[in-house]
Image: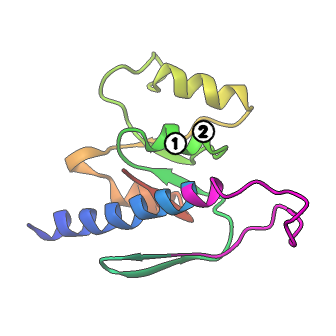
């Protein structure tokens, strides 16, 4: 495995774990009269153990970048419009977005995410320029 493959694998592991942790935390129990804490919408720190150590997310991510199939749809389903997504080499509409992503983003009134080269030619510089708080990947 070369350096880029190791780096991308590490990023993918961290981001995939973050998706899982955020998804599971969103699926927590329902608030009811027995809950002592009032649901005030506050974000709780999330710690994710992974092969490279521990990722600590202390604040609610505002700038999310997605990599790979399904991660953009997952973010949108969780109410987060990514600031950056990989280009879609097939199935895109005339604007370059998958039709259902284009529709979902416009429906909530957000700007369409920036697109960057993905796959084996992942444009790391474009991702860094987006200044993401979190990168989500399968």
Colour scheme: rainbow
> From mark 1 to mark 2, how far is it between C-alphas?
5 Å
Please indicate whether residue 103 sits to the left or right of residue 41 in the image: left
Residue, disc 2: 77
Q: Residue at x 45, y 17 (%)?
A: 93
Quick check: can you spot residue 83?
yes
Residue, disc 1: 74
| Residue 32, percent from left and from top | 86, 57
Residue 23 lies, with reference to residue 53, above or below; the image says above
- Name the quadrant containing residue 34: bottom right
Direction front: furthest residue: 34
**Secondary structure under badge 2?**
helix
- Name the quadrant containing residue 86: top left
Image quarter where the N terminus lies is: bottom left
Residue 106 lies, with reference to residue 47, above or below; the image says above
Direction top: furthest residue: 94
Q: Residue at x 35, y 44 (%)?
A: 68
Q: Residue at x 17, y 63 (%)?
A: 5
Q: Which residues are magenta?
A: 24-47
Q: Is residue 26 magenta?
A: yes
Q: Residue at x 52, y 57 (%)?
A: 130
């Amino acid at each position: 495995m070369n350096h880029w493959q190791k780096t991308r694998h590490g990023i993918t592991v961290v981001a995939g774990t973050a998706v899982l942790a955020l998804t599971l935390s969103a699926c927590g129990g329902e608030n009811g009269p027995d809950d002592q804490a009032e649901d005030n919408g506050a974000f709780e720190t999330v710690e994710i153990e992974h092969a490279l150590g521990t990722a600590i997310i202390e604040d609610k991510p505002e700038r999310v970048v997605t990599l790979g199939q399904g991660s953009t749809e997952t973010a949108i389903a969780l109410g987060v419009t990514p600031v950056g997504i990989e280009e879609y080499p097939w199935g895109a509409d005339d604007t370059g977005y998958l039709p259902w992503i284009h529709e979902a983003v416009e429906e909530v009134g957000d700007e369409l995410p920036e697109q960057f080269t993905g796959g084996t030619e992942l444009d790391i510089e474009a991702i860094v320029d987006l200044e993401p708080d979190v990168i989500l990947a399968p």
